[in-house]
Amino acid sequence: MIKIIFLPIALLLSSITLLAQTATLSGTVKLQNNQNAQFVNVYIKGTSIGTTTAENGTFTLKNIPMGEKTIVATFIGFKKEYKKILFKENKTYTLDFLLEEETNMMNDVVITGTMKEMSKLNSPVPVEVYSAKYFENNKSASIFESIQNVNGVRPQLNCSVCNTGDIHINGLEGPYTMVLIDGMPIVSGLSTVYGLTGIPASLIERVEIVKGPASTLYGSEAVGGLINVITKKPLNAPLFSTDAYTTSWGEVNADIGAKYKISKKVNALVGLNYFNYENIIDNNNDGFTDITLQDRISLFNKISFNRKNNREFNIGSRYVYEDRWGGDVSWNPEFRGGDSVYGESIYTSRWELFGNYQLPTKEKFNLQFSANGHNQNSVYGNTIYKANQRIGFSQLTWNKELFTSHDFLVGAAYRYTYYDDNTPATLNFDSLRNKAQETHLPGVFVQDQVSLNEFNTLLLGVRYDYNSVHGNIFSPRINYKWNTEGNKTVVRLSLGNGFRVANVFTEDHAALTGSREVVFAGELNPETSRNINLNVVKRIYLKDETYLGLDGSVFYTYFNNRIVPDYETNPNQIIYDNLNGSAESKGVSLNVDLTLPNGLKLMGGATLMDVTIDEEGEEVRQLLTERFTAVWNIEYTILPWNLKLNYTGNIYSPMRLPLLGELDDRSEYSPWFSIQNIQITKSINKQWEIYGGVKNILNFTPASNSIARSFDPFDENVQFNAEGEVIATENNPNALTFDPTYVYAANLGIRGFVGLKYTLK
């Protein structure tokens, strides 16, 4: 009886004793980049037991109950690590962590700055990196639209009728921006006008941007900066993916991608993009389409070969066909090229081939190659413009590390450009016959990256090119990088030269609208620039898992022989000439990356700049260039609902606009304006995702007078004097002609959108 009474009591006391038994865990946390591991969070999953590491990376957890537990170590900018321990006895256990850096933070791998893969933080050249996920926060049909949310980079429309455009970097016009695909100069010359909208966002793995001259490595056109679109690799791509959305305006965009095996050692990726917009809208009641109607298809294929010793061999190809038109809302193809109803109709057919091959040698030789053909059949009212461009490019580089501290890159490049059209640009005035332009541009370059010590790196580079038209061109550069331990602070100083050999007809769409005559004031010499850039990067890790990244720059560029289009001397002409003076671009910019532990992320930036032209002592602001711009992307994730909210936008200060004379009563400057968007993304499961939102929630559109005299596009009721100048009349008191170049933003108003994405990995 006594045993029966005391047995439950004994069991209870035993249980109390077991519950009272707790263990202690101590250890250290190290970070992959050897930086200070203070304030790393270490906790036991599913409990309230946790702590942060001390200055030397050590931690201690007490009162841990018996049983198997999962210990988690987490730190902003590093991959979260899990480890399991079975706590059996009331004693002290030890555990160590080594956290690896996240590749999607400020330590991305980049290749654009030095033509070699390296950590972004270790690169002596400042490179900004934007992943495909960044652009997915504001769904767009092409890279031209997506790039508007990058600080200091602005897609500029050049025509209110056919909506062609280019990309400005730090206020410099489109011809100063070089656009690469996988490091190859694919989008250049004629294709800078229409080729940018043909790059679907679905193909993008990341985009690398260098602001400032990069001619030492990449040659002509890289004067203001370059944009390198890195496409997805077959091995990293999903097995199958599709993404389609539509807007309330009737825009339809669809992407389909799939990877497949050709053999055991050959993998391939195929992608298809289709964009269609066939809805005629004239909300500003000027009689012209607000945005261009488009029917575009783009087919992409990339093949990757698995070779011995991980040597690279990739081949990519792309074909784009587009039919677009804009103009009088009553226009149809029957009026194409006529003078009864005004319309701008462009048929574009384009093919591209590019790749790289690492030679099977002991030394690191890499051969890059590309070729593309661009055929354009277009009419601007009754002006017919037909053009054919072919570009071939090859480059051989040799990379060698010498004396432990020197990393040499030596290269030889050759670029061939063929251009032919039906304008005076390719007319031989001696024989009065058409003669296609052929340009040969061989070049050599060398760069030496010197590791002075753990905290100091020096990059020296020089390039020599010989242009078959303009002769010798020489461009050096110097880059210096200083960093603290763990790269928490990085300072870069860059000095360099840039050059650009201009082909005016292929780079300025206003020359093709038919509303102006193109005049060359003299033989155009190559432009040159000198640039200095100071860049400072600061990474701050706070105790509560808050991460703050700051990236600021001060830049200055000085131009010689700048080629300036003069729209103002004669409203019926565009007069091209080398500037008899100088031009400057200067400013400051700051990017901010903030991540909070509650799921809130903020990426934003602002640029303050001044771009001026000084001719014969008179300094004026460059046309269509803002002095201040800011962008933002605010993201909040609600994990229990698998819901992500994105609020993106930009804001621009007034720009000086091209007026048609002293009597033109339109405003000389654009207003402050902002384009803002909201997107909500819901992950249904690992495969399905639905999204939707509102674009341009403020419903901003330019003034309805953006097209001068849209009611008289053939200038039938415009009178001219003997010098070809417009005369003010009763029917034309402001002495205007038809002109669509008074444009600073798209006429795309507020619109809703909804889309569906499927991914099979």
Image: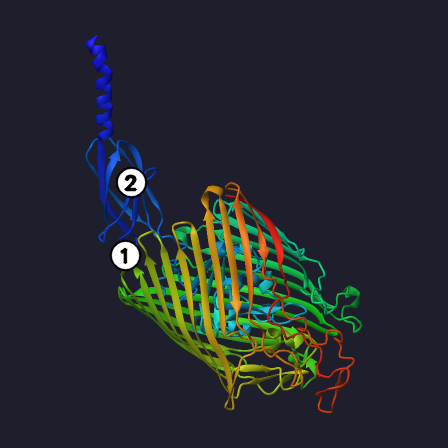
What secondary structure is found at the residue carrying circle 1?
loop
Residue 196, percent from left and from top: 58, 64
The quarter of the displayed image where residue 720 is located:
bottom right
Tell me if I can see residue 330 in this picture.
yes
Query: Which quadrant, please, contains the N terminus?
Result: top left
Label 2: which residue?
49
* Few, some or many residues within 10 Å of mark 1 (<14, 14–19, 20+): few
Task: Name the amino acid type tagged 1.
Answer: Gln
Q: In the drawing, does residue 64 fall left or right of residue 658?
A: left
Task: Look at 40% across and 49% down and name the residue there.
Answer: 598
Query: How far apart are labels 1 and 2 at the CA level?
Result: 26 Å
Residue depth check, mark 1 versus mark 2: number of the one nearer the observer: 2
Residue, disc 1: 35
- Count neighbours of disc 2 (C-alpha within 10 A) and say few if under 14, some if 14 to 19, many if 20 or more: some
> In the image, what residue type sits under mark 2?
Ile
Q: Position of residue 320 (x, y in %)?
A: 62, 60
- Horizontal arrangement in the rendering, residue 727 relative to residue 139 (left or right): right
**Relative to residue 86, is residue 613 depicted above or below?**
below
Answer whether labels 1 and 2 touch (C-beta < 8 Å). Answer: no
Label 2's element?
A: loop
Counting from the top left corner in percent of width and height, residue 90 is at: 20, 32
Q: Is residue 110 visible?
A: no
Residue 189 location (% of width, % of height):
58, 71
**Sequence order check, earlier mark of 1 and 2:** 1
Number of numbered tags placed on the structure image: 2
Q: Quadrant of residue 383?
A: bottom right
